[in-house]
Amino acid sequence: MPSSAHHPASAPPASKVSDLHASAPPIDARQKELADRVMRLAPLEGMNDTSLEGLSIARASEATAMQRPVVYEPALCIVVQGGKRTVLGDEIYQYDPLHYLVVSVPLPVCAHVLVAAPEQPYLCLKLTLDPDIIARMLLDMGDEALAARDRGVARTRDRGLFVARMHDSMLDAVLRLVRMLDEPRDLPMLGPGAIREIYYRVLGGELGHRLRELVEVGSQTQRVARAIDWLNRHFAQPLRIEDLAAEVHMSASALHHRFKAVTAMSPLQYQKQLRLHEARRLMFAEGLDCAAAGHRVGYESPSQFSREYRRLFGAPPRQEITRLRQSGEAA
């Protein structure tokens, strides 16, 4: 993206420029400070809540050899230490401390931690996305500013998930937010502004247009997001693509094409994944047996449910739930 032009008379003297650069700590020093602070804030394995609503920290002391099917909710995930791999359909996304992951719509994926050790655990900040705040920011920024940011940026596939490189300005914003967590009295006043700055850096980044399209009223991506929301609320019901298309004011063919562009799967495939994940939760957390869980999520045939469950999770329902309980994993 081209930088803004400046009149020569307004530029600081060369010595001042070098002083400004010298005053900023090296990027690896900032990363080390960020990792040290986040590790103190996340003493437990798994997810750790923070004093700021919507911000949590994932910690894992060991790499996971097997990919686990999970549903990612809309969030910004910033790897602080270690590395992770996420698989959506046949696409692989890897991210480490120099990259961040944005999930703009709920997506069933497979994921596993690639790099982690007890002395240097995998650490990841997870910031839940707030579409209302993002929409208000876009209004404040205005069309001209957004168009200027997009000049020279190549449009990419419109997946509801993307990985982008973390630049200095975003690293600085994330570090400021984490520092505030050690000063909880400052959070009510300064925390929302720090989160807005992080959103601003993502929106202005190389793939920020993907996030912007999600909240642009009437855009096809936003209509797909509405279809995804409808499926998440009605996944146990029989699905007719024509009815879903009418719900979001699209033609059936346009919805099918755009839905697959965003999620890497068709609406029917997406519904199946939601059903199986919910059945897994019902068996693990609520103790339902296989037949009851399958029926609850919309399966009429127990054999079909068991067959599709095994295909997704790698084992029949009862065996896979037993393994989960023995390993202490969360469904």
Image (cartoon, rainbow, N blue to C red):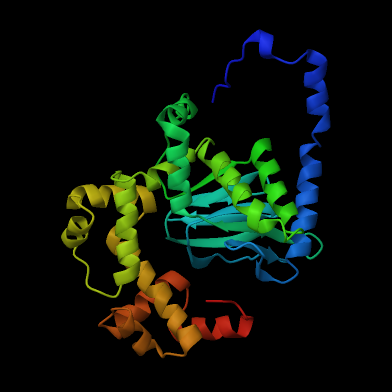
In the rendered image, residue 31, in percent from the top left (x then y), is placed at: 76, 46
Q: Is residue 312 above or below residue 322?
A: above
In the rendered image, residue 229, in percent from the top left (x then y), is placed at: 34, 62
Specify the quadrant of the image occupied by residue 325: bottom right
Specify the quadrant of the image occupied by residue 50: bottom right
Query: What residue is at 60 percent from the left and 43 percent from the top?
Result: 197
Query: What residue is at 45 percent from the left and 31 percent from the top?
Result: 146
In the rendered image, residue 154, in percent from the top left (x then y), is placed at: 45, 30
Front one among 10 and 15 = 10
In the image, taking residue 46 as reference, residue 221 lies left or right, namely left
In the rendered image, residue 64, in percent from the top left (x then y), is placed at: 64, 66
Query: What residue is at 63 percent from the left and 81 percent from the top?
Result: 328
Query: What residue is at 75 percent from the left and 69 percent from the top?
Result: 43
Residue 275 shows in the view: yes
Q: Is residue 303 above or below residue 270?
A: below
Give the mark count.
0
Q: Which quarter of the image is occupied by the N terminus?
A: top right
Q: Is residue 295 above or below residue 113?
A: below
Residue 209 shows in the view: no
In the image, taking residue 235 as reference, residue 245 lies left or right, namely left
